[in-house]
Image (cartoon, rainbow, N blue to C red):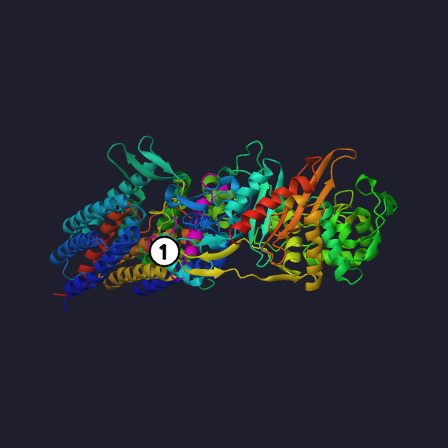
Amino acid sequence: MSARNRELIALIPASLLVTAGFAGVFIQRSNALSNISLTYGAIFLGLCLVGHIVIRMTLPNADPYMFPLVAALASFGIVMIYRINPTLARQQAQWFVLGLILFAATIIFFRDYRKLERYRYTIVLISLGLLILPRVPGVGYQANGAYLGVRIPGLFVFQPAEFAKIGLVIFLASYLRDTRQVLVTGGRRILGVTIPPIKHFGPIVVIWGLAMGIMVLLSDMGSSLMFYGGLLAVLYVATGRLSFVVIGLLAFVLGAWYLGTHIPHVHARVEDWLHPFNPHLYNRTLGSYQLANGVFAQAAGGMFGQGFGQAVITLPGGGFLLPAPQTDMIYAVITSELGLFGAAAVLIVYLLFIARGFKAAVLSRDSFSTLLATGLTAVFAIQVFVIVGGVTRVIPLTGVTLPFISYGGSSIIANLVLLALLLLISDRARRPAR
Amino acid sequence: MNAQIARLFGLIVVLFGLLVVFTTRWTVIDKSKLDNNTLNRLTLIQELKIRRGRILADDGTVLAKSVPAAGGTWNRTYPTGSLFAQAVGYSNLAQGQAAGLELSDGAYTRGLQTGLNSVFGQLTPHRVGDDVHTTLDPKAQQVAVQGLAGQAGSVVAIDPRTGAVKVMYSNPSYDNNKFNVNAPGTTTFNRATQAGYPPGSTFKVLTATAGIDSGQYTPSSTVNGNSPVTISGVPLSNDNNQSWGNVDLTTALTYSINTVWAQVAEHLGRGTMTDYMKRFGFYSKPPLDYPPNELNVSRPHGPNGKAYPPASHNEDIGRIGIGQGGLLVTPLQMAMVAAAVANGGKLMVPHMTARVVNSDGVTVKRINPSVYNQVMKRSTAQQLAQMMTKVVEEGTGTAAQLGGISVAGKTGTASIGAPGSNLTQPWFIGFAPVDNPKVAVAVTVDKSQGGFGGTVAAPIAKSVIQTLLSEGQ
């Protein structure tokens, strides 16, 4: 069977999932099955078919499982968002349409994505500019103490970090393709560990500086960790030097510890993480209220969950019991309603997608493609880890989205572009040799 | 580079494993600890969304019901308001405030008592609690309100055969729809269960029980009834300082002769008296289906207001034997004394909850009558019933007479307030019909201006007994 036919068949579970999910929410809402659920399922299936046809026409050899896995995540996400707020789900569906247009555009315009290398300095400058944007007076704004968003009044709101992550990975993959040989050769062996010459620590120092800068300027630990982890992963794969990773992680921990004790917002987030049930922290503004209630919601889910629509999100008198249920806290809502097993299933779908991303990296025949696929996949994986780890108290809670599931236009569009790039790499890698 | 990618993937698998471990920690390992965390309001919010069942009187009158409120929650309203406010109480889950049956039967009205019900509750979008049918009788309760006619006091009526509480009223009452508004002249304090009043001469029923049941006296035993006599070193007089000479116990009860009963109590001693008090339920909280913190314990107290330990050598047992000497009781306890005598000495557990019916009309729980204690021998109870019948026929309790139906009873008039003040605590306890008792009552009026049990309390008891008997009790 051809790759595209496998992809088409693999889309069936995703469309069944979205139909069943909407049916579940409708049954819970009105105690009666409505045919609107089938309409929603059909519309979503139609969108997936459009995506599939784009891939079929342009990337016949691309990995057949990536798109269906994303479709499953996105369909699950739209059901969860619908259950939280139907209006947001309609908007999310619109973002998905826009995302698919950009997805198709990326595939068509960057069919030879290697030409991106030529613009790597332009790309890195635009990415860094995007990152600074939330601090620019007039357009940037603060949410929950961190500078995450940009608002163009009357037009739109977006989160530049979602797009910057792709640009930075492109730059690093391209940069390291040129310099990785230099970084690997030379150096002295001390106690069996090869220590590269000091000057070759340049890239890692730059990345470290970037991560710390994000934390200082934007008070945004989540994005900082996402970029740093992703870029360190690319550096490690490019050079094979574990010493980079060890030194890099130590430097990050030291820096994060220093900033965590000196930047009030970051420090507060660390305190909330360590003592979410401390009544003082719980009751304070931007305190541990959200995190504590996220954990309570997960506990309420137990092993098998309370069922669709059963999680308590709002207070009877109005207001949120669980703030930001459709973005930061969506994993807690999933766990509350579908339990440990449902949440673990979602994580497994992410792992399968990550595995396909790395598979594309391994199959690639040139190092730029390998490094780009590795970087995009790693950034994606770490983003999932940062937000789920935040909600489950593995690490302090920070505001990044759960890719393809959380509500948010920037997130869904940027991640569809990321998917397009991975499919482009995969298609080139799997193209039969001529 | 492929080996590095494999290792990187391995690391990510480990990190995701960590996410699953932590999710397991919250959803399984620490689940109950988190569910019970004081900051966790999920249980409360879910309970607010339960449509709790009604509380109903024995004739089906709705005493409490749920009405829809904001956000899918429900509020409680009490159609009968102040009439049953003390017994039914109130409940405001959001503020964590509840009292009365609303508190003690909360698990029923929320519908949590059966596993089956909670399983189906998960499947239906709106959880519905169970109806609680009580033993309370609105007509007789209304008669009690009219009888008290605005005087502070309390009326309790029990079916002595089953322990079913038919009347529980405390005046002043309050509107339980606005329980947290402290309107002037109202109180949530339930005199029937929370007060501590000197029982006065009604306690002589207990002293007589101890004397006869212990075999040391019979109804015809004679004791010198001259006045005054010295009890615990202090002279004790009869009403009007009247000396009766040698009288039998029946006469002594009929005319409520203090000096006789004080001597009987002293003769029996603290041990026997305390034993019989405990048998009737003194020294412990009444076994009523009611919140424990709204139940007062009946027992003797010292001059400093502190409860004496049982059979304390500081007790003036002679004066306790006539319902003074620091003895403080609840009207509920005195109704239990009357009920025990009425039911052949067998004291039934008093209860207000009769049965619990779920939303499908199925009775899921029925409160069957149960024995609290065999307080005395059957023969003792019969002798006491005859003695108490004399009280109503020709003694201090004639105001409780019912044409054609024999009533047994005992009056009491305790002096309260500063020495020389006119304030009294009038009482009447009794039961009817004597040959087949169906109703036992205790009535008391708080801080009467010189009123007597026989003139103030007995007529109220009479009208309540009459109402309950006319309903075929």
Q: Which residues are drawn in magenta?
A: A283-312
Say if the magenta span includes residue A285: yes
Disc 1: host chain: A
Q: Which residue occupies the foreground of this view, B59 or B351? A: B59
x and y, in percent, of residue B393 in the image = 68, 49
Say if the magenta span includes residue B80: no
Q: Quadrant of the N terminus of chain B?
A: bottom left
Judge left or right: residue B444 versus residue B65. right
For the residue labelled by badge 1, is the local secondary structure a helix, a strand or a loop? helix
Judge left or right: residue A32 versus residue B115. left
Q: Can residue A44 be seen in this view?
A: yes
Amino acid found under the numbered disc labelled 1: Glu
At horizontal 47% and vertical 44% (from top left) the residue drawn is: B94
x and y, in percent, of residue B4 in the image = 34, 63
Q: Which residue occupies the foreground of this view, A386 or A98? A: A98
Residue B2 image-quadrant placement = bottom left
Relative height, residue B229 to residue B162 (above, below): above
Q: Which residue occupies the foreground of this view, A234 or B301? A: B301
Residue B427 image-quadrant placement = top right
Judge left or right: residue A51 versus residue A376. left
Question: Where is mark 1, residue-wise?
Answer: A337
Q: Which residue occupies the foreground of this view, A104 or B366? A: B366
x and y, in percent, of residue A207 in the image = 37, 48
x and y, in percent, of residue A280 in the image = 53, 42
Q: How many other residues sit within 10 Å of disc 1, few (<14), some (14-19) or many (≥20)?
A: many
Q: Can residue B97 be seen in this view?
A: no
